[in-house]
Image (spheres, grey):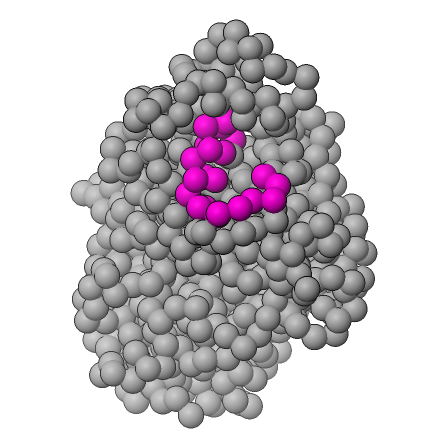
Amino acid sequence: MTGACAVIGVGQTRYAAARSDVTLGGLVREAAQGALDDAGIGWRGVDAVVLGKAPDMLEGVMSPELYLADALGAVGKPVHRAYTSGSAGGVAASIGVGLVSSGLHARVLVVCFEKQSEARAAGATLQPLPFEAPWHGGTGSLFSAVCREYIARSGAPADTGDLAALKERRNAVLNPYAQIRKPGLTVADIGSSKMLWDPIRLLHSSPSSDGACAVVLADEATARRHTRPAWVLGCAVRSEPAVSPWHDNVDPRAGRDCAAAVYRQAGIADPAREIDVAELFVPYSWLEPVIMENLDLAERNAGWRLIQRDATAMDGPLPVNPSGGLLGANPIGAAGLVRFAEAALQVRGAAGEHQVDGARVALGHAAGGYSNCVAAWIVGRDLP
Amino acid sequence: MSRRVAVIGYADAVSGGSDGSSDAELLAPVADRALAAAGTARGDVGVLCTAGYEFGSGVIGSMMDVLDVLPCWPPVTHTHLEGDGGFAFAEAWVRLLSGEADVALVCAFSRPLAADLDQVLGLQLDPYLVAPLGPGARHIAALQARALLAAGRYSERDFATVACARRRGLSVEQVLAQPYLASPLRAADCSTTNCSAAAVAVLAVEGPATRAAERPAWIAGLDQRVESGALGLRDLTVSASTRTAAARLGLPGSAIDVLELHAPYSHQELLLADAVGAAAIGALNPSGGVLPADPLGVSGLIRIGAAASAVMRGDADRAVGHASNGPALQHNLLCLLEGER
C-alpha cells in the first residue's frame, strides 16, 4: 500500500432469516446510512462506491450495482464491483483500500449485501459437475470433508466443534445485530443437535441470512480529523486454483500467503501474540481451528487445543469472533465485510457488549470457494 | 499517484455461436497469446482481474473454473465481477497504482448459452417494479432511440448510416427497408450477440516490463461513472456519465486519433461520440465496433484492447477505449491511452 487508509464509519443491518420489511435497495441503504452517520459525513462526501455481492445469480439481479445505484448514493460517481464467492466482502474492502491508498479517492463507501430469503443458496452455490449424478450436498458437504481430513491429520477430539460453537453462540448473544441469539445453550445441546454432514451438526452451522454491511474508508488527512479511526495496517487478497495437485482444502496456500502478506505489511512477527482479537470467516464451527492454523494463529494440527482450553473466548489470550461470527448470521456476500467491519469496531473500542478489553490490533478474514479465495486485513488503533 | 501504468500486451478471440468449449478452454489460449505479446511470463503476474456474465452462460461461480487455467499458482490477488471486462481493467489499474504488484492480467470471457440474451439482460432492471414487466435490453434501447428522435437530435436515417458503416454489404436504403425489431430499431441497428469470446490485456507498472515492450500504451486517464437505476430519472438523450468521465479526462475539445466505443445499438454510437465531445477524431471504431459481434461481457474490454493496440502498433498516439454496462448505457467507462511521441 502507498498512502494510509482508515475506517471512519461502520454500519450494519439487523440480520434476519427474512428481512421482508425491506427491498434489496432498502437493505443496502440501511447499512450505508449507518456507516455514513457513524463517519459523520453525508452522501455528498462519498467519492466512490464499492459493492460486494456473491453470487449475483442468487437473487436473480444481474449486476446489482445498476439497480442499486440510487440506494447506494452512487449516481454520478464511480462504482466498483467485487464478486469472488464468500471472500467477496473482504475483496470489496480491499478494492476500497486500493482506491484510497492509490490516491484516487479520499472517501470510499464499501457496501455488501445478501438477501437469502429471495434466493436459494444451498443448492445454487454448488453447481452440478458434468456426468455426475446430482448429490444435493450443499456447501456443508464440501466442508464436512475438510473437517474429517483435519480430524485425521490432527487427532482433534470429537467435541471440538461443539466447544467452538458454544463459544461463538455465547458471543452472538452479546451482539445486537446477530440473527441467532440463544442464551443458555450447553455443550450437550450442541453435541446432540441434528447431524447434517458428519461431523457437522445443525448447531455447528451458520444460518441463512438477509443483511448488509458498510464501511467508510478515508485517506490519512480525512481520518486524522476523525475521533476514532481504525487504521488499515495491512490488506491482501490471495486466490489459487480450486482444482490443482497443490490445492490443500484444509490448509490452502492462498490463506497462508494472504496472512503472511498482511502480517508483513503490518510489521507483525508473532501474530498469535501481537493480534488482540480476530474476526474469522467460520461458516461451520469445526473450521475455527482449521482456519486459525491456516492463518498462523495456532501451531499446525494443534489449533483444537486452543478450543479445548477456551483460549479463543472473549476473555482468553486470543479472542476469536466476539461478534458470534457467521454462526450469528451469514449473509454470504456481506459476511466477509462483516468480519472486516467487526475488527475495525474492536480497535475503535466501539463493539459494545462484545468489546474485547484493550483491543489495539485486530485481524479480519474472509474466505470463499473451495477455501481457495482468501482476503484479510489488519486494523489498528494507531498508525505507526 | 506516482506510479504509471501501461498496457503492454493484448489478445482476443471472437467466434460465432458456441463450439461447446468451456470458459476455461476459451480463455487459456488467449491468455497465453497476450502474455507472449507482452513478453511476460505467467509467474510475473501478481494481480488477476476477471469478468463475465454468469447470467449469460448460466454457470454460477464461473470465475472458479477459469482460475484453473490462469496464472495463480503461487496464489495471486484476484478480483472478479459480473459485468464487462472493461470494468475489470479499471480494477487492475487501481491495484497496480496502489502498489499491490507490478504486472496484472485482465480477462473477460463469454459464452452465449442462455436462451435469449436480450431477455436475460432485462434482469439488470429494478427487480420489483420493472423487470417483472419483461422488457428486454433492446426495448429499453428503443425507448432511448425514440427519445432521441423526439428531441430532433437524429433521424432513423442517421441510425441506419451508423449500421451501414459497421456492417459490410448493407446500404442505408436496405437498412431502412428492414422491419422494426423494436421500433425505431431494426435488426441492423442491434448488435449480434450470439458469439463466444475471450479477451486478455496485460498491464504493467513503469519498470522492466514496460521498458522491454516496444511501445507501451500508457494509461493517461481512466474514469467511470454510473447513472440512476430508474429510467424515468435519466435524460436518455444524453450520456451524462460519459460526459462526466470525458470531462475528467480532458477530452472535450481535444483531438484523439482513435475512439473505440462500446455501442450495442447504432444510435448509441452517435450519443456516445457526442458525449465524449472530442474536437477531432482520427478514426471512430476502426476495429469495426460491436454491431457485427458483441460478446456479452467481453465487448468493452475488446474496445479498450483495440485502442491500446492502436497505440502499441504506432497507429495512434492518443486513443480512447470505452466500456459500458446496464440498460440504455447506464454505466460508462473511458480510458485514455497514450504512446510516447
Which residue shows up at 31% across the image and 40% down it? Answer: B229
Provide residue A343's location: percent of width, then percent of height.
36, 74
For residue A99, above or below residue A200: below
Numbered range of the magenta stretch:
B264-284
* Left/right of residue B60 with respect to residue A13 in the rendered view: right
Q: Quadrant of residue A112?
A: bottom left
Which residue shows up at 44% across the image and 46% down it? Answer: B277
For residue B133, above or below residue A9: above
Q: Quadrant of residue A89?
A: bottom left
Could you tell me if residue A26 is visible in this image?
yes
Provide residue B293's location: percent of width, then percent of height.
63, 29
In the rendered structure, does residue B326 fall within the stretch colored magenta? no
Q: Quadrant of the C terminus of chain A?
A: bottom left
For residue B167, above or below residue B28: above
For residue B274, above or below residue A247: above
Could you tell me if residue A191 is visible in this image?
no
Which residue shows up at 54% across the image and 22% down it? Answer: B161
In the rendered picture of this protein, how many numbered marks are placed on residues? 0
Frontmost residue, A161 versus A12: A12
Frontmost residue, A201 versus B320: B320
Provide residue A132's location: percent of width, then percent of height.
67, 34
Frontmost residue, B8 versus A46: B8
Frontmost residue, B249 versus A212: B249
Provide residue B167's location: percent of width, then percent of height.
63, 23
Which residue shows up at 25% across the image and 65% down it? Answer: A45
